[in-house]
Amino acid sequence: VSSTVCHIPGRRKSSRIPEGMIEMGLGIHGEPGAETIAKRPVTRVVGDMLKIITDESKDRGYMSLGGGDSVALLMNNLGSATALEISVATRDAIRRLEEKGVRVERVVAGPLMTSMDMAGFSISLLKLPSAKSERERML
């Protein structure tokens, strides 16, 4: 999710995302998002993102998570989100996952894969094996 498209030095800034809006599902290279929505509190955005990631609707094929599952959470700063913003989003993602009974075994948060100055973040979940010995090897 981002409120700006990355700005490539030497090129005009894109105005694709209107003021007061954010894009969900946009590409790291500036590809258009799946939808443009009104800005909202980051906790609501995190909830929307996790709902999409874990949606088990027919033909979605996303991640099935339930009570007792373990995950690693990657909270990626796309470029110009502040440390405070990433921390708030990370804390909310952990809270929401734990409310579903999902154990967050590892958290990695920060600028993992950036897109210059894109103002936003992405969430990735890695479902961990159920056997503790296999989980420990992965982490």
Image: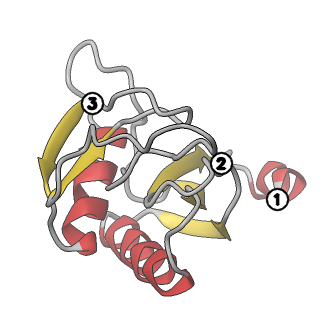
Q: Is residue 39 above or below residue 57?
A: below
Q: Are marks 2 and 1 in contact (CB under 8 Å)?
A: yes
At label 2, which amino acid type do we have? Leu
Determine which residue is flagged by label 1: 139
Residue 82 or residue 112, whichever sits in front: 82
Toward which corner of the image does residue 40 lie, by quadrant? bottom left
| Residue 54 in sight here | no
Task: Give amino acid for label 3.
Answer: Glu
> Would you name the residue on which mark 2 appears?
128
Q: Residues within 10 Å of mark 2 (few under 14, many from 20)?
A: many
- 14 and 134: which is toward the camera: 14
Q: Is residue 107 left or right of residue 63?
A: right
Instruction: Report helix, strand or loop for mark 3.
Output: loop
Instruction: Please name the amino acid that badge 1 sits on.
Output: Leu
Among numbered discs 2 and 3, the one appearing first in the sequence: 3
Mark 2, secondary structure of its residue: loop
Q: Residues within 10 Å of mark 1 (few under 14, many from 20)?
A: few
Residue shown at 56%/32% (left/top)?
29
Name which quarter of the figure residue 56 lies in: top left
Q: Nearer the viewer, residue 15 or 85?
A: 15
The residue at 36%/76% (across/down) is 92
In the rendered image, residue 91, in percent from the top left (x then y), is placed at: 44, 80
x and y, in percent, of residue 85 in the image: 43, 79
Q: Is residue 13 left or right of residue 7?
A: left
Q: At numbered mark 1, what does the secondary structure look like: helix, strand or loop?
A: loop
The residue beneath circle 3 is 56
